[in-house]
Image: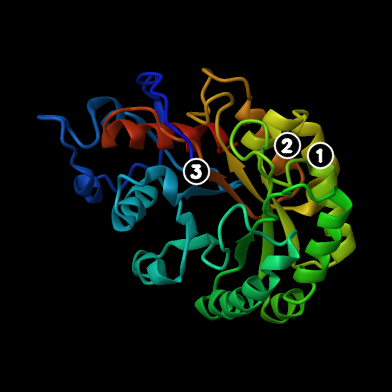
Amino acid sequence: MMTTHNFGRRTLLKQVAAMTALAPLSALAQNVPGEQVINTSLQNAVKTPLKGHINHSVSRWTFGDLSLEELCLLVKSLGFSAIDLVGPADWPILKQHGIDSSMCNGAELNLEDGWSDSRFHAQLIPRYLEHIELVAKAGYKNLICFTGNARGMSREQALDNAVAGLSQILPSAEKHGVIIQLELFNSKVDHPDYLADNTPWSIELCKRLNSPNFKLLYDIYHMQIMEGDIIRTIQQHHQYFGHYHTAGVPGRHEIDDSQELNYAAIARAIKATGFTGYVAQEFMPTPDTKTGRAQSLAQAIQICDV
């Protein structure tokens, strides 16, 4: 989705959550001669269990160098059990490892052709009706959706179109207990012309649909680029947010102190709202090796585990 810029290896974390299952990480053996799968710094880390206040996840695409099975082993070794953006074909692998599909996908056409353009409703409606049933049958809860691009359309027309289309699938979502989650993107850097590029417009769509089974996937990285004021927004509008994504700004890399957001404070704000959904890491790790990228994920989980 973006070009990765290598900012160099981050400072190795001093603590790693729940490193009680290091052996399965042998599947992560890397191409660097002699490199240990989990290096000395990680092996000697204090084994601190996760606090249990934040439900952690990670987006599959950001660790695309790992097979899904390898990613399952990695997240289990770090003490959590959820992966975002996995479709029906791969759910058996998740189930084999006891991993939740925390944000299901596969019903969408793409990121540009979405619900705000009525030309795509004839394709989207049957796809989403089918996937809602698949999600429910698999025992999952969340299904992602996108507004798509404006292509010269007014914001008001885009709202009308989205309401007209989504209203045709929400009764099924409500019946099956599935939450349709609209992801917010920035249109400044990564997704030019995307419609759901700000919180107020997206909340207005929620209000018009007026369904407990339609929520916003509040992507912190994207909204920091577009509008900032992240913690206040979470405090004031958390009732509309059903899922969170993280990444460092600028660059969409690690969420450590090399970037401008204070993710520990943001995680505390999310926790304070009583949120019970998932906070999913969606940063692009910068290290050159699988071990280094695993360390980046471990560090991110530790930062957000408040």
Q: Is residue 22 left or right of residue 115?
A: left
The residue lying furthest to the left in this view is 33
How far apart are the alpha carbons under marks 2 and 1?
Answer: 7 Å
Mark 2 falls on what kind of element?
A: helix
The residue singled out by tag 2 in the image is 269
SS class, disc 1: helix
Of marks 1 and 3, which one's residue comes earlier in the chain?
Answer: 3
Q: Amino acid at mark 2?
A: Ala
Please name the residue that numbered disc 3 is placed on. 50
The disc labelled 1 sits on which kind of residue?
Answer: Gln
Task: Please report the residue visible at 45 percent of the width from the left and 35 percent of the height from the top.
Answer: 284
Residue depicted at 68% across the width and 37% down the height: 187
Name the one closer to the observer, 257 or 45: 257
Query: Callout 3: 10 Å neighbours few (<14), some, many (20+)?
Result: many
Identify residue type, mark 3. Leu
What residue is at 61 percent from the left and 76 percent from the top? 132
| Residue topped by disc 1 | 235
Label 1: few (<14), some or many (≥20) within 10 Å?
few
User: Badges 2 and 1: C-beta atoms under 8 Å apart?
Assistant: yes
Label 2 neighbour load within 10 Å: few <14, some 14-19, many 20+: many
Query: Spatial distance from mark 2 to mark 3, Cα to Cα?
Result: 18 Å
| Foreground: disc 1 or disc 3 | 1
Residue 145 pos. (x, y %): 64, 60
Q: Is residue 62 left or right of residue 242?
A: left
Q: Nearer the viewer, residue 52 or 126?
A: 126
Image point (70%, 67%), residue name: 119
